[in-house]
Amino acid sequence: AQSVTQLDSQVPVFEEAPVELRCNYSSSVSVYLFWYVQYPNQGLQLLLKYLSGSTLVKGINGFEAEFNKSQTSFHLRKPSVHISDTAEYFCAVCGVKAAGNKLTFGGGTRVLVKP
Amino acid sequence: NAGVTQTPKFRILKIGQSMTLQCTQDMNHNYMYWYRQDPGMGLKLIYYSVGAGITDKGEVPNGYNVSRSTTEDFPLRLELAAPSQTSVYFCASRSPDRASYEQYFGPGTRLTVT
């Protein structure tokens, strides 16, 4: 079984400032890692994923994340945010051999970008 | 492609009523999932299916039932609705492509049980 902890429930940030959203996971098996974004009143969409290879992963809208196996972390970063980045962000993991490739989600981090 | 569609968008139920949440995908995805989203709790998996005729329980299946008679449709049934089932429900689907693992989500159904 896996668990995911997103350390910040809310992150206020000014426009054009950098942002980092923290994600730590626990698992007894190898995992794949994901970040999803949910804009207000919408479903989730994939920002980026780590399956294998380079531990620095680039996603859509200028986001990137770094997989750190020793610290079991997968923090999400963006060097300069826009108002349109206001959303809720979810970190998720999936056991590499999990039946159905089920995702386990963290509790979410709400990002509010201020002008 | 319309992707993953869900109906209805909103619903209010009285305690003890039943209803079916509809989910359809037109991407020919084998894998489909139902989640519920409660404030501050992230998404919890209710049921999932790896293909027509095959379903399995997720983390929070109590009070729900599913069926998967076709690849496209994965309805979620609530019997004897309870206030604890007030939530936002999301359906998702995934390609069997092992290089992808991306789940595609519908827009959600907001359900209130009073």
Image (tube, coloured by chain):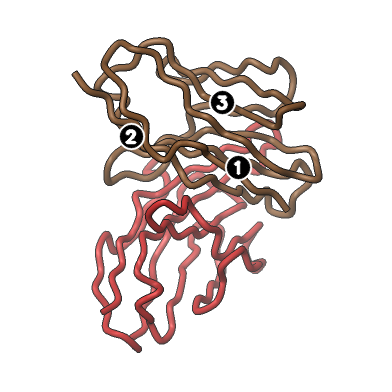
Chain colours: A brown, B red
- At a point 31% along the width and 28% down the height, the residue shown is A12
- At a point 30% along the width and 76% down the height, the residue shown is B113
Amino acid type, residue under disc 1 in the picture:
Ser
Kindly state the secondary structure of the residue where label 1 is placed.
loop
Alpha-carbon span between mark 2 and mark 3: 16 Å
Image spot of residue A88 (x, y percent): 37, 38
Mark 1 crowdedness (10 Å alpha carbons): few <14, some 14-19, many ≥20: some
- For the residues beneath circles 3 and 1, the answer to whether they share a chain is no
Amino acid type, residue under disc 3 in the picture:
His
Alpha-carbon span between mark 3 and mark 1: 26 Å
| Quarter of the view holding residue A24 | top right
Kindly state the secondary structure of the residue where label 3 is placed.
strand
Q: In this rendering, would B34 be left or right of A41?
A: right
| Quarter of the view holding residue A113 | top left
Amino acid type, residue under disc 2 in the picture:
Ala
Mark 2 crowdedness (10 Å alpha carbons): few <14, some 14-19, many ≥20: some
Image spot of residue B78 (x, y percent): 43, 78
The residue beneath circle 1 is: B95
The residue beneath circle 3 is: A75
> Which quarter of the image is occupied by the N terminus of chain B?
top left
Kindly state the secondary structure of the residue where label 2 is placed.
strand
Tag 3 subunit: A
In the picture, the disc for residue B22 is none
Tag 2 subunit: A
Residue B19, placed above or below residue A11: below
Looking at the picture, tell me which residue is in the foreground, A83 or B19. Answer: A83
Q: In this rendering, would B90 be left or right of A27?
A: left
Q: Nearer the viewer, mark 2 or mark 3?
A: 3
Q: In this rendering, would A103 be left or right of A97?
A: left
In the picture, the disc for residue A87 is 2
Q: In this rendering, would A35 be left or right of A93?
A: left
Alpha-carbon span between mark 1 and mark 2: 26 Å
